[in-house]
Amino acid sequence: MTAHIIDGIALSKQLRADVAKRAAALRARGVVPGLAVVLVGENPASQVYVRNKVKACEDSGLHSVLERYPATLGEAELLARVDALNRDPAIHGILVQLPLPAHIDAHKVIEAISPAKDVDGFHVASAGALMVGQPGFWPCTPYGCMKMLESINYDLKGKHAVVIGRSNIVGKPMALMLLQKNATVTICHSGTQNLKALTLQADVVVAAVGKRNVLTADMVKPGAVVIDVGMNRNDEGKLCGDVDFDGVKEVAGWITPVPGGVGPMTITMLLVNTLEAAERS
């Protein structure tokens, strides 16, 4: 048995077409959904991510503003800039690209963003809303994973989901979203003993640790859904995930590839969140 592929590129195109349609409806009412992206420093990966985010906005009929600052920018100056964007009625979403230079407290900057414009879903208010099941902005990567499960009409009720990773950006919010859909959720991490025993019980595995081959074929229950959030490089320098794709696809029922899986969905959900922020305003 070879797994069905959950194609993040194809699903992204569908969702972005819907975003473009809703954005056009807002523009007809005089509201142009606006995203401000703030980049501090010269991190090469961050520059690529930011460029992709800005292009995705433009392609979907959203207005985007890219603000670039040198790595020497002071924390107080950045906080002042965030405050100005909070008060700008043309901006509905604010994204400060992480990581920030070491002298800037990233948590302080994220908390300075208005929860109404927190389209990354990283603010404590957004995390709290997710925790208690209230409306708020969901972090884009796990939100994209949920959309992928939805796209294959996968009913999570009563299923056992194992999340490998406990970051605030993916692992923890992913677990909460799965829980909201009535899955039984196990969170695994570097302190987990006998990871294989747990993943072999899982109907759904989400691998999100940033470590190659953390999930191999012998760790997967036949027919399970495997979602690979990892972004790594193999020995040849090619992009790969946390999952041994070639091995696992022969056991799993569904699998996401890297590249072309969760990655495109992350940016798409940022557009969805920005659009919703504009609709709410």
Image (tube, grey):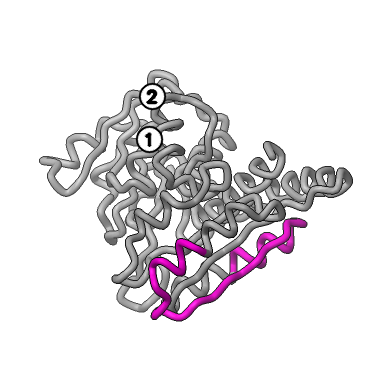
**Three-letter amino acid code of the residue under disc 1:** Val
**Answer yes or no: do the residues labelled 1 and 2 have beta carbons within 8 Å?**
yes
Q: Nearer the viewer, residue 108 or 159?
A: 108
Residue 30 image point, x, y percent: 85, 48
| The magenta segment | 52-80
The quadrant of the image that shows the C terminus is top right
In the image: residue 131, left or right of residue 17: left
Residue bearing mark 1: 204
Residue bearing mark 2: 183
Q: Nearer the viewer, mark 1 or mark 2?
A: 2
Q: Is residue 223 in sight in this rendering?
A: no
Quick one: label 1 or label 2, which is nearer the N terminus?
2
Residue sitting at x 47%, y 55%: 257
Residue 222 image point, x, y percent: 34, 36
Q: Is residue 175 in sight in this rendering?
A: yes
In the image: residue 116, left or right of residue 139: right
**Three-letter amino acid code of the residue under disc 2:** Ala
Residue 212 occupies quadrant: bottom left
> Dot 2: within a 10 Å radius of its alpha carbon, few (fewer than 14), some, or many (20 or more) residues?
many
Helix, strand or loop at disc 2? Answer: loop
In the image: residue 6, left or right of residue 178: right
Give the Cα distance between marks 1 and 2: 9 Å
Does residue 74 belong to the magenta stretch?
yes
